[in-house]
Amino acid sequence: MLRKRTVVLMLFFGLLVMIFSITPVRAQESDDSLVRVPDELTTELKIKVAYNGQDIFWLFEWPVDRAHFYHDVVVYQDGDWVRHGASPVGSQEFGLYEDRLTFLVDPGTVQGFATQGCYAACHDQMRFLNDELDEATIAAHPLLGETLGRTDLRKYLADSRTGAEWWDAPWDDIKSPEELEALREAGVFLDFWHWRAHRGGPVGYADDQYVLEFRNNDGTKAAYATNWDADVGQPRFMFDPAQVGFTALNWDRLINFEYTQDDVYYLSTDNTVPFDPDHNWQNGDVIPRRFLQQPEGSQASITADGRWADGVWRLELRRAMDTGFPTTDHALVEGRTYNVGFAIHKNATGSRWHYISHLQKVGIGTPAAISAVRFNGSTPDWNSIPWTTLPMYYPGQITWEWLTSDAHPGAPEMRADSRSCRDCHGEDSAAVFKMAQAAQYHELREGRLSLNWWLTLIGGFVFLFGGTIVALNLSKYKEV
């Protein structure tokens, strides 16, 4: 029979290993991990909406300790231009990623959106999820890769796929171009309003996009373009010294956030000249990798005015109630109610690292959770309209596929499109925080290395074996 000290050590070791391996550990320790959980799991968004019969106006406020309106730059370093600020995993290390506000609008045509909101567009294998598809797989797809030129998977709707059930949405089984066009003509898409603090904000525009088989731009010319010539490995444009007094920004000033919104920190058609490779460039010279311009067509539909002050972003968006582009924009009609899902990005995060709201009902001159107020004139009197405050939460890696799977207790109601997240979980701040905690647990659990599973198994066996030895000894003692 084993000695008492050996048995005690086995019990202690087994229990210790189990606790270590089961306890959620943030995966920031691994540079290759796609698991990044923000320290702040929830935040809030304040909203006012008004309309005058011609245009609709949205006013937003949300707290941000430090505004991020720099974005994606190239830095001169020993003869080369080095990129900083590509779409990051979690927060960008130097703060070079813009804050954003987005929302999806549905008039009631997209199945699943009226109950589940943004989750209807979030799927397995999208970029920056643990199971994300590789670029070669997407590039080889006949539509996404060969036709659209995409290299990653982004928002899409189950309506655009040919699954066995309405909620079944295999990423690669996309309906034909003719079927997709018919869906757009029938209004089966999400109108996507997308404000970016750098890529459009400084020139007064928000992106106008839509979601169906992918997250698509409404037109061909957005408010920004790429200021990079890949063939020669250098920028296309630089600052015009005759206008602004310099050819480049300074790296130290940039990462210390010394450029304000009133300074020249972005490139646009008004302040640039063609890049001069023979200029006496110095280490630490910085040129934005994005070039701002006047958008055209439907992508010029949404004007924007966003300012950060005293720890708060304040953003006003304006758009015609009917833009005249019915296959990419939803007309907003007085007397109707729309399904809307809101999201914000802050703390230099991109992609899926955002905060979302429960699905909201927005009424245009009719009672709803958020009611747009009619006014006369060209600009609303915002002081006369009360705020609606929404609790926002981090959704982690929860996807449409997980929510409609047997792993989710609410899956039957989701597959029946009969019950919303709010119905099950609640909508106040405390309930939303619990949802964020659940999303955090799900992400950390899914992101654990297989080593932890084996440690749990080994620790469990050791603990059970030690416990069995103790039980046998106790039984022997009682017999004596």
Image (cartoon, rainbow, N blue to C red):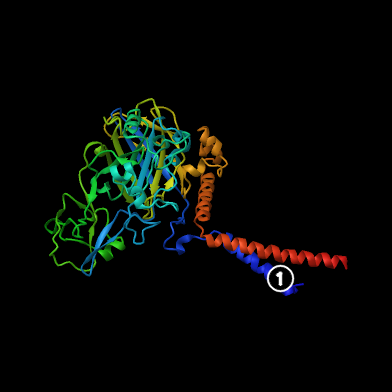
363 over 345 or under it: above or below: above
Amino acid type for the residue under numbered disc 1: Val
Name the residue nearer the viewer: 388 or 34.
34
User: Could you tell me residue 443's position as x and y percent?
Assistant: 50, 53
386 over 392 or under it: above or below: above
User: Could you tell me residue 218's position as x and y percent?
Assistant: 28, 38
Tell me the quadrant of the picture where the N terminus can be found: bottom right
Q: Is residue 260 left or right of residue 343?
A: left
Disc 1 residue crowd, few under 14, some 14–19, many 20+, Cα 10 Å: some
**Which type of secondary structure does the marked residue at label 1 adopt?**
helix
Q: Is residue 230 left or right of residue 359?
A: left
Q: Is residue 426 left or right of residue 175?
A: right
31 over 98 or under it: above or below: below
- Could you say which quadrant of the image residue 253 lies in? bottom left
Name the residue nearer the viewer: 426 or 449.
449
Query: To which residue does mark 1 refer?
Result: 8
